[in-house]
Image: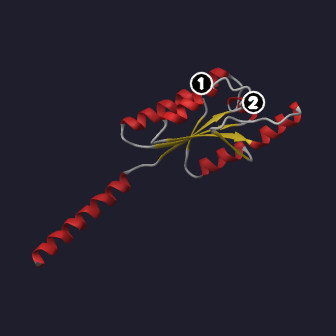
Amino acid sequence: MRSLLRSIAGAVLLSLIALSAYAAGAKEHRVAIQVNQNDPALMNLALNNATNVMEFYKAKGEDVQIEIVTYGPGLHMLRDDTSPVKDRIKQIVDASFPSSVKFIACGNTKEGMEKREGKAISVVSEATVVPSGAVRLIELQEAGWSYLKP
């Protein structure tokens, strides 16, 4: 009986060691992509970058977190009424599992556009509005995220 308990304890210990070694070797992939121009080609390039990064890590069996942060004229990417890539955004979000793609809209830019245009502006349902897109990028970089500017 003692021999059986020792064997079980040894197997459990080896499993825990292997699991902790695997966890220590697993790298967390996180990338922030900036879009600050109202240019459909640039918006598509950012979406291509996100898709390529997701597919690369998916092929390796690894997850990646991606945030596409828009501000200034780039907010048009996420505006419900002016986005030239609205359909593509939905497709990317739907295909992203198990990775994560978030679309971030700058609240400062949104407020400025609303003031200039004299109307409320809505963003696509896949987007989240933050107080400042620039500050969001700073926070992500300070937290160790990689940064891409297409």
Are the residues at dot 2 and dot 1 in contact (C-beta closer than 8 Å)?
no
Where on the picture, by quarter, is residue 17?
bottom left
Secondary structure at numbered mark 1: helix
Vertical comparison of 69 with 139: above or below: above
Depth check: 19 or 86 in front? 86
Rendered location of residue 67, percent (x, y): 59, 41
Vertical comparison of 39 with 114: above or below: above
Which residue was labeled with disc 2?
73
Depth check: 72 or 86 in front? 86
Question: Around disc 1, counting alpha carbons within 10 Å, would you say few (fewer than 14), some (14 to 19), or many (20 or more)?
Answer: some
The number of numbered discs placed on residues in the rendered structure image is: 2
Q: Residue at x 63, y 20 (%)?
A: 41
Determine which of the numbered discs, if any, sits on residue 72 in the image.
none
Rendered location of residue 68, percent (x, y): 61, 37
Where on the picture, by quarter, is residue 102?
top right
Where on the picture, by quarter, is residue 57?
top left
On the picture, is 56 further left or further right than 104? left
Depth check: 148 or 104 in front? 104
Q: Callout 1, which amino acid?
A: Asn
Q: CA distance from mark 2 to mark 1?
A: 15 Å
On the picture, is 100 further left or further right than 106? left
Which residue was labeled with disc 1?
44
